[in-house]
Image (cartoon, grey):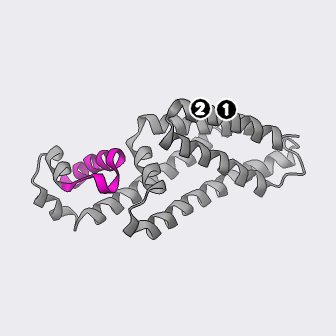
Amino acid sequence: MTATRIKEVARTHFAKNGYEGASLADIAKDVGIKKQSIYTHFKGKDELFLALFDEVLAKELLFVQTYLANNKHLSVDKLLYDFLIQYQDRYEQDDNTKFFLRVAFFPPSHLYDEIVKQGYGYLDTIETMIMPLFEQALDNEIISPEVSSDTATVAFSAVLDGMFVELLFGGSARSMKRIESSWFVFWRGIKK
């Protein structure tokens, strides 16, 4: 129970303050324990941080899998546009998503290689889940035959990345503007 509570509180601290700005003393205080008690459950800040990152990464992948499975009845353009909107909403409301994006874009320097490797793995997994949508859209002559499913998938990832950057730096209003404009150009560029 205490390890779970430590992770819950730490996730909020890391999401808000980043790795460097989060202190184990503040986390312990908010949990209602002494700082030394954290070491009963975690060897240190790095172990706590990486345990959280692994959990959050799994939750973010589950969100993508669940969203795609629950909305497969939608047209590909509606499905993917709504996915962007859902992701933006998650960022606004969910510390898991805030933590994940902050860490993926601003990993602690000493954990950089490990975090970036997992972050790219996440993006590669999303592309693997989304590519069949574009393959089906090609088969159904919804998107132009001049655009391969691979190109459409990578271009969609660029739209997603742009939204992530704007969420981190500009906030939700600027992110929405980025989504609307980039989606308009993206979809016009690939549709038949």
Quarter that holds the C terminus: top right
Q: Quadrant of residue 112?
A: bottom left
**As drawn, is 81 to the left or to the right of 5?**
right
**As drawn, is 52 to the left or to the right of 105?**
left
Disc 2 to disc 1, how far (Cα)?
A: 6 Å
Residue topped by disc 1: 180
Q: Residue 131, position in %: x, y? A: 72, 54
Residue topped by disc 2: 176
**As drawn, is 56 to the left or to the right of 178?**
left
Q: Residue furthest front?
A: 169
Q: Amino acid at mark 1?
A: Glu
Say what secondary structure mark 2 lies in.
helix
The magenta segment: 1-24
Q: Amino acid at mark 2?
A: Met
Q: Residue drawn 44% across and 56% down? A: 106
Q: Residue 105, position in %: x, y? A: 48, 54
Say what secondary structure mark 1 lies in.
helix
Q: Residue drawn 43% across and 50% down? A: 102
